[in-house]
Image (cartoon, rainbow, N blue to C red):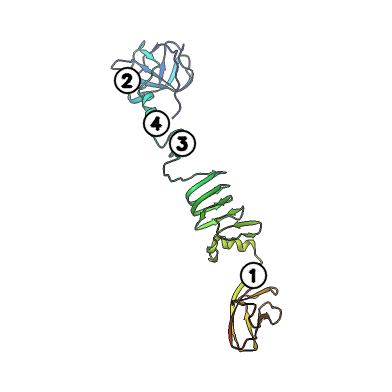
Amino acid sequence: MPKRNYSSTTIARSLGATMTVGSAIMVLDSTATVPTAYPFTMVIDPDTSSEEIVTVTGAPTGTSYPVTRGSDGTTPTEHLNNSVVRHMVTARDLQEPQDHIYANAGVHGVTGSVVGTTDTQSLTNKTISASTLSGTITASAATINSPTINGSTISGTTTNTGTVSGGTVSPANISLLSGSLSLGTNATAIVAGGITISYANIGHLLNSTSNIQAQLNNKLPSANIQTGQKTVTVAANSSGTDVVTFTTAFTVAPVVVLTPVRTFTSTSPVIQVTLESNATTTGFTIRFINGTASSIALPVNWIAIGS
């Protein structure tokens, strides 16, 4: 609806010709003092049974104005030559502000609902850029560009190229790795391919179908990291070996680190766990040495890192 225009200096005019019921042209006796910004309201035959409100929609040709008939609930009727025509305030000029005051949609040029600062509302079809967001944010196939999100819970499917800090991120699918993501305060950072995921609880990355996991794999296409545990029982005062075979062969021999799962004291007898020889692309051999007077079942954690 276009804005209507008003004048405080328009004097009463009269019709310069009879106006039939079907006519969309209003002929005035003169254009003097008539508003020159469109649209505006004119009332023909005011305070009579023939009163009709018309909306003047454009500039005149001579003294002939294009109009919309029967405005503001009135009915088009025939008006005789010399009928009084006034520029007036009508019911709609008072009703529309009241409707606006109590409306929560379709105001201020907004087609949908107006977003408030205190009411609980659902936002759809919004572009949020360079914003600070807080509270619980549920996103469904949403794109959040360069936001700062503090102390929030985010769920749903999101694309994030901004910074998320101090909150909980639990989406079904996060597409990021084009920016820096900071999550929570529960774990150390992962830095890969120029992307930092810091202070996060990232347990769900163990899910092989995770979108984040897939993207990390893409960022580290040559990485091959395998882990496991091997337990060997070694007789008293003797040694033994056992072979570990990798689930997937490495392209080149990896680096292998062994960690015994046992607490030792400075007075403990000699117990050693070493590599029998350098690891190969398919596995390695662990040597267990038991310097105690009894048989020992010794579990050892191992990690192999290579490509």
Image point (35%, 25%), residue name: 72
Comparing labels 4 and 2, the label whose residue is closer to the camera: 4
Q: Position of residue 242 (x, y in %)?
A: 63, 84
- Under mark 1, the amino acid is Asn
For the residue pair 22 and 255, the one nearer the viewer reads as: 255
For the residue pair 14 and 306, the one nearer the viewer reads as: 306
N-terminal of the pair, mark 1 or mark 4, is 4
* Figure quadrant of the C terminus: bottom right
Q: How far apart, in angstroms, are the residues tagged by discs 1 and 4? A: 64 Å
For the residue pair 22 and 273, the one nearer the viewer reads as: 273
**Residue position marked by numbered label 2 in the rendering:** 77
* Numbered circle sitting on residue 300: none
Where is residue 239, by image quadrant? bottom right
Where is residue 238, by image quadrant? bottom right
- Under mark 4, the amino acid is Ile
Where is residue 99, by image quadrant? top left
* Figure quadrant of the N terminus: top left
Q: How far apart, in angstroms, are the residues tagged by discs 4 and 2? A: 34 Å
Mark 3 nearby-residue class (10 Å; few <14, some 14–19, many ≥20): few
- Under mark 3, the amino acid is Val
Whether tag 2 and tag 1 are in contact, CB under 8 A, the answer is: no
Q: Say above or below: 85 vs 92.
A: above
**Residue position marked by numbered label 3 in the rendering:** 110
Q: Position of residue 107 (x, y in %)?
A: 43, 34
Residue that sits furthest to the left in the current view: 49
N-terminal of the pair, mark 4 or mark 2, is 2
Mark 2 nearby-residue class (10 Å; few <14, some 14–19, many ≥20): some
**Residue position marked by numbered label 4 in the rendering:** 101
Q: How far apart, in angstroms, are the residues tagged by discs 2 and 3? A: 36 Å
| Mark 2 secondary-structure assignment | loop
- Under mark 2, the amino acid is Thr
Comparing labels 1 and 3, the label whose residue is closer to the camera: 1
